[in-house]
Amino acid sequence: MWRSTSCLRLSAVGKRSAPSILEGATVRRSKIGRYTYSRAISTTTTPGLIRGHGSTRQSSAAAALKPVQETHPEHHEQNSSTLGDLPTSRIDDRKVVVGWDAQTWSRYHHIWLRDHCRCPQCFHPVTKQRLVNTFEIPFDVKPVAVESKPEGLDVTWPSTQPHISFYPWSWLQQNSYDPPLARAPPPEKILWGSKILQDPPTVTYEEAMSEDERGLFKWLSNTEKFGFCFISGVPPTPEATEELSRRIGFIRETQYGTFWDFTSDLAKGDTAYTTLALGAHTDTTYYTDPCGLQLFHLLEHSGGSGGATLLVDGFYVASILKELHPTAYDLLARVRVPSHAAGEPSALYTPTPRSGYPVLRHSDGELIQVRWNNDDRSVVNHLEPGMVEEWYDAIKKWHQLLTSADSEYWIQLSPGTAVVVDNHRVLHGRSAFTGKRRMCGAYIGVDEYRSKLAVLGEKFAPDSVVQETSAYATVNGRSIWNMLL
Ligand SMILES: C[N+](C)(C)CCCC[C@H](N)C(=O)O
Ligand SMILES: O=C(O)CCC(=O)C(=O)O
């Protein structure tokens, strides 16, 4: 992986869009209880012809969640189905095989398909929770028929009342596991060094607070892409800053309080409440689940100097460490680092397990979290004796890269400009200062952050499956085929 001194772009893998399948559908709105849902009535449907899915309750609701399509008996073959240029489908001994084209096939275990049925009898359309009892599905369950329809695959299961499960083609394609097909690429991340100062991600307070949430989506999308984002034009009050923080989600309360407004008076037992310089670190490394976002807003700094804010892209620095010192990178990815917060008499935080977590946490080989605060690190007593010096060499290399001029982005915050930081990626710090300096802000949990981003994504950038199914599968404002379910 090569890098520039300014930004490194981890470009998104090219998306392969699944066939759009709702052109020409007529959408009819109806109600389930207090929820409005819409269903696509295919242009070929004979009005009033709603295929049952067993019980009356299920058939009307089930029909609401999928396009009503006139059955084509001539295509209703026992164990295979093909309709022109639609994907083919056939029943094998243990799996249903879908043919996307002459070279591309996916195989879905019968039990997997049955377990993932999303008809209202098997999957609650409002709560999006599984209703089918997975453990009552016979292990050797096998469809009696499959049918390739314009919108997706119909699978008929053996039961006293015909139970037909419907799966949109785009959903089957995105969830193909045998083999995995073109999955939506992860959100793009732009790694940066000190040159980000030329054009740092910023939104205005008006954008962030706008009623339609489009500006909020821009703010959080920037944060997801860069690991931080400034908010300009924020009224320099704790009240406005707290309201801004709560736009993202509820604030995470900690031993430092809920919304914090602090200065150098050791009001809390932490060096943040002093005038000392703080090296680049992530916060709450001593929690089993460190906070996701951290928002800072400098309200005042008078009668002194210093107190500049430091930001460092931990993913950028990790990419350099991996390139220049792969052995050190590997150690930081494996060795657990214990930590604690013990400055408040009423609190003594340590993570579970006590040995803590690696500095660089990965999932499926991808770096997903940086967790580093050398000041809060506890006794390292679990290293193999032969690894101790190697580990210190590794964290020294990490520290040297973290503190290099190429990595450090220093800014002097001022009242009116807040900054939100992804505490799982971007390290922050500050220079020592004199005078009276007042900073306020809040922590937001990582799940609250990701949830808000997901909800805004549904609204402003729905995934391809939601786009293609929302006309007939949206209940309570959410498609039952959302790829996050
Ligand atoms: C942000 N606020 C001033 C409230 C608390 C700062 C806590 C800093 C702590 N050493 C850590 O790294 O988690
Ligand atoms: O005072 C600052 O600018 C930042 C303090 C800090 O690093 C923290 O609160 O975690």
Image (tube, helix red, strand yellow):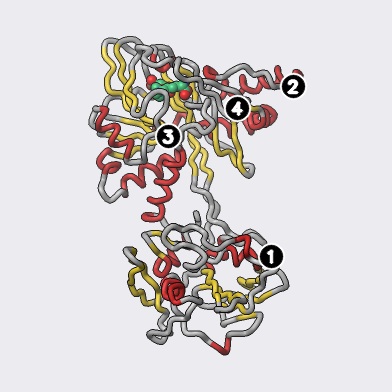
Name the residue at the right extreme. Answer: 386
Q: Which amino acid does label 2 sit on?
A: Glu
Disc number for residue 293: 3
Mark 3 vs ligand 1: CB below 8 Å: no
Q: Which amino acid does label 4 sit on?
A: Gly
Q: Say whether disc 2 or disc 4 marks the residue closer to the N-terminus.
A: 4
Residue sitting at x 35%, y 22%: 412
Q: Say whether disc 2 or disc 3 marks the residue closer to the N-terminus.
A: 3
Disc number for residue 282: none
Residue sitting at x 67%, y 67%: 138
Q: Please indicate whether residue 333 sits to the left or right of residue 476 in the image.
A: right
* Label 2 element class: loop
Vertical comparison of 204 with 433: above or below:
below
Q: Please indicate whether residue 8 sits to the left or right of residue 26 in the image.
A: right
Question: How many numbered discs?
Answer: 4
The quadrant where ligand 2 appears is top left
Please state the horizontal and vertical placement of residue 242, each as a whole percent of the image.
30, 32
Q: What residue type is labelled 3?
A: Leu
Residue beneath disc 1: 139
Q: Say whether disc 3 or disc 1 marks the residue closer to the N-terminus.
A: 1
* Label 1 element class: loop
Residue sitting at x 37%, y 60%: 476
Mark 1 vs ligand 1: CB below 8 Å: no
Residue beneath disc 2: 384
Vertical comparison of 322 with 58: above or below:
above
Marks 2/4: CA–CA distance = 16 Å
Please state the horizontal and vertical placement of residue 169, each as a whole percent of the image.
54, 69
Residue beneath disc 4: 356
